[in-house]
Image (cartoon, rainbow, N blue to C red):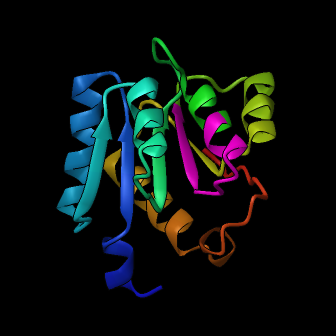
Amino acid sequence: MTDNDLMRARILVVEDDDTMRDFIVEILGSVGFTNLTTALDGIEAWRKFEQGEQFDLVICDWIMPGMDGLEVLKNIRDSRAAIPFILVTVRDSEDAIKRAVDRGVTAFLSKPFMPDQLVAEVLKVLSDSSVLEHSTNAEVWEF
């Protein structure tokens, strides 16, 4: 995938906090990502998948009312979709990470994070050829 292709990736940002959601979208837009969709919670995110919307990457908060990030991830994986999934979280316990990996998370981003950390993680996930080939092998990167 070329840099230009990466910037056209279809990214779904799922975050119930308006400020954090706007922050993520602003950061990604500022570096050239042009195809950003948002969901206010896990239920809205899952509805987009059920309606057939296609994404190249999901960036999702873990803790949300209604349907949390792991439930969104489980639904996506149960539908056999191997879309790369970055879980944004304040949780960093070994047990929490293991549960997320077991569900098929691609990468983690710990709150609070700096803009360059978000961009680096997104580029890393999108440019990883095993991810682009829709591998279901989960990998945990340092966070």
Q: What residue is rendered at 58% in x and 57% in y?
A: 83
Residue lying farthest to the bottom in this orientation: 2
| Residue 111 appears left or right of 142 | left
Above or below, 94 relative to 143? above
Q: What residue is rendered at 37% in x and 81% in y?
A: 5
Above or below, 26 relative to 123? above
| Residue 102 appears left or right of 104 | right
Query: Which image quarter holds the C terminus?
Result: top right
Residue 110 image point, x, y percent: 52, 35
Q: Quadrant of residue 68?
A: top right
| Residue 41 appears left or right of 142 | left
Above or below, 76 relative to 1? above
Residue lying farthest to the front in this orientation: 51
Residue 36 image point, x, y percent: 27, 54
Q: What residue is rendered at 41% in x and 88% in y?
A: 2
* Viewer-proximal residue among 32 and 116: 32
Residue 142 image point, x, y percent: 66, 49
Q: Which residues are magenta?
A: 75-88
Q: Quadrant of residue 39?
A: top left
Q: Is residue 119 magenta?
A: no
Residue 7 image point, x, y percent: 31, 72
| Residue 124 appears left or right of 16 | right
